[in-house]
Image: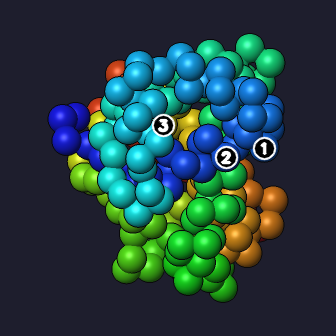
């Protein structure tokens, strides 16, 4: 989707995740796989800036080339890392609720604070279970979806959900009409 954007904090948290998991040399390897203009753009990005999703995707492809062979689950862990770090720091009042249902059904959308345009909408909600649908936003590739899976899992935990499980049950990148996630917790 042309015009899709991400908050700089999502980009910064990806680099912080690489540094924490694999060290500064891995960050250099990731950045070295990017075009010079992409490296300059990343160096100038503040957490509150918006960046084109294509820049995020380039960073994720480079990260996958560096981390993926030894850690194929890095996108989910990176999404969880983003929520527990930048997410809580910037939006703790949105994340830290009495229950996952309170978090999921509140008026303020955490998705919109990280990505534009579109939203993550609750299409089913009951105690211990919810289904979220991504509307008006093209993920572009499955790394986005996998990061969302990890981020949603960590969000449910932060909102007090015990033994959470998050499954990406429909994926527009893989041919479905939209992306959906099923969340369960105790």
Q: Is residue 118 above or below residue 53?
A: below
Q: Nearer the viewer, residue 13 or 73?
A: 13
Name the spot of residue 36 as percent of width and height, x first: 41, 22
Which comes before the other along the chain, label 3 or label 1? 1
- In the rendering, which numbered label is found on residue 16? 2
Q: Position of residue 126 (x, y in %)?
A: 55, 70
Which quadrant holds the C terminus? bottom right
Image location of residue 130, percent across then percent down: 54, 61
115 in relation to 63, above or below? below
Find disc 3 in the rendering and name its residue. 144
- Residue pictured at 54% horizontal, 72% vertical: 90
Residue 170 appears in the picture as rendered: no
Q: Secondary structure at mark 2?
A: helix
| Residue indicated by mark 1 | 20
Mark 2 Cα within 10 Å, few/some/many (few <14, many 20+)?
some
For the residues carrying marks 3 and 1, which lies nearer the camera in this image?
1
| Side of 129 where 24 appears, left or right | right
């Amino acid at each position: 989707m042309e015009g899709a954007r991400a908050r700089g904090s999502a980009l910064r948290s990806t680099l912080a995740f690489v540094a924490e998991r694999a060290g500064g040399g891995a960050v250099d390897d990731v950045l070295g796989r990017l075009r010079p203009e992409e490296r300059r753009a990343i160096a100038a990005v503040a957490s509150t800036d918006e960046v084109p999703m294509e820049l995020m995707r380039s960073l994720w492809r480079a990260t996958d080339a560096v981390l993926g062979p030894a850690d194929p689950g890095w996108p989910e862990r990176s999404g969880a890392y983003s929520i527990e770090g930048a997410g809580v720091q910037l939006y703790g009042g949105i994340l830290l609720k009495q229950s996952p249902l309170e978090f999921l059904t509140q008026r303020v959308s955490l998705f919109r604070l990280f990505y534009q345009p579109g939203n993550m909408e609750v299409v089913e909600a009951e105690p211990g279970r919810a289904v979220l649908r991504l509307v008006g936003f093209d993920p572009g590739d499955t790394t986005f979806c996998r990061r969302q899976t990890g981020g949603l899992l960590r969000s449910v935990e932060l909102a007090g959900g015990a033994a959470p499980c998050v499954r990406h049950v429909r994926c527009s990148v893989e041919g479905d009409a939209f992306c959906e996630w099923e969340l369960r917790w105790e």
